[in-house]
Amino acid sequence: MKKNILVIIFLFLFFYPGLILAQEQENKSQEDSAPVSTALENFDFSAQSKDQIFEALVVKVIKEKEITEENGAKVTQQNLVLQGVKGEWKGREIEIQGISKIDVPSAGVYEVGDQVVVQRSSSPDGAVTFTIIDFVRRGYLYLLAFVFVLITIAIGGRKGFKAVASLVFSFIIIIYFMLPRILAGSNPLIVGVCGAFAVLALIIYFTEGWNRKSHLAMASVFLSLVATMILSLIFSGLAHLTGFSEETTFLLESGYKVVDFKGLLLAGILIGAVGVLDDVIVGQIEAVRQIQEANPALPAGQVFRMAYKVGNTHLGAIVNTLFLTYAGASLPILLLFVIKQEPFLTFGQIINNEMIATEIVRTMVGSIGVALAMPIATFLGAYCLKNKK
């Protein structure tokens, strides 16, 4: 009964913030709403702001045209009729003229029934245009999150519940502790170290309990994070990395010029290694504990060597997992290795580019930190768990 209550409370905490946010957005869009009308010409545009974003439903595909670009790629353009679904736009029909000589590579292909995000813009001469900027996809994301929680708890039981709860708390630490302080001008590296340590402390103590094994895991985490931080500082300095990228320039455009972008890069390296550190460290200490329980008479040195061999069997897979994670996130950048266009003709020119160099430093430093975590955790476990339960 208690377990069921905990699951209900967790699901409430997991979904309630998203529901509240959605409700606030809906209430905001409904403020000062005009009477519903299906004729766009009856709408008072002068009373509205210059730019406005709202949601609408595709109710009709008027015309569809497929064009072939010079490189052979095919692009579909559409003229559509949309109908607003919320607030002052509810029930109003809007026509989108998507067929034109201007090619928009990111334009999607829409069907009747699709819900989309629309931007209304007005030019200085008073002309009003409507543009579809994205699909409305949050409902499917909520569904996926529910399936994830359900399957994890069904398979993992109590451990699965703790794992998902730890994930939610980690997200809260990052969103409500780390990011606001970085935007406020705090040193991102310090915030990143504290946040990463807090995330791992939460995960380890919540899933493994308050015991000697967890304490040794946290000591290993601390030493591994310090080593990763030092390597990050050294090699980001030697490589003259600034932390500026397409992902960070929007902060400048939004007025957040106080952010230390290099520190933000270093904090990202630490956070990227956190998840794998947890797996390596807890796994190695558990391996030590199992070996000691199987043969309590073994000396610490022998236990260390046996557990070290266990760690070696999956260290390569873990480091490769970290590399593939970074590579997957940077796949568009990695295309520079194959396009062979100026100024990226040679291998040396490509890796000299700051975007590529940043990913190399991120991957290598994170992998070194993970590799060091294995012997550190094994050593502490072998010599500090000896004959202790």
Image (tube, rainbow, N blue to C red):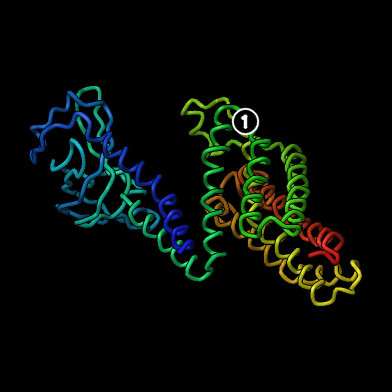
Query: x and y percent of residue 134 in the render?
Result: 32, 47
Q: Quadrant of the N terminus?
A: bottom left
Query: x and y percent of residue 284 in the render?
Result: 75, 64
Q: Secondary structure at mark 1?
A: loop
Count neighbours of disc 1 (C-alpha within 10 A) and say few if under 14, some if 14 to 19, many if 20 or more. Answer: some
Query: x and y percent of residue 197 in the render?
Result: 67, 46
The front one of 363 and 149 is: 149
In the rendered image, which quarter is residue 7 located in?
A: bottom left
Q: Quadrant of the C terminus?
A: bottom right
How many numbered markers are drawn? Answer: 1
Residue that label 1 marks: 260
Q: Residue at x 24, y 28 (%)?
A: 122
User: In the figure, 124 relative to 370: above or below?
Assistant: above
Q: Residue at x 18, y 38 (%)?
A: 89
Asked whether residue 346 appears in the rendered view, the answer is: no
The front one of 109 and 320 is: 320
The amino acid type, in three-letter code, at marker 1 is: Asp
Query: x and y percent of residue 95 in the render?
Result: 16, 43
User: In the figure, 110 relative to 32: above or below?
Assistant: below
- Residue 273 as seen in the image, left or right of residue 60: right
- Residue 21 as seen in the image, left or right of residue 174: left
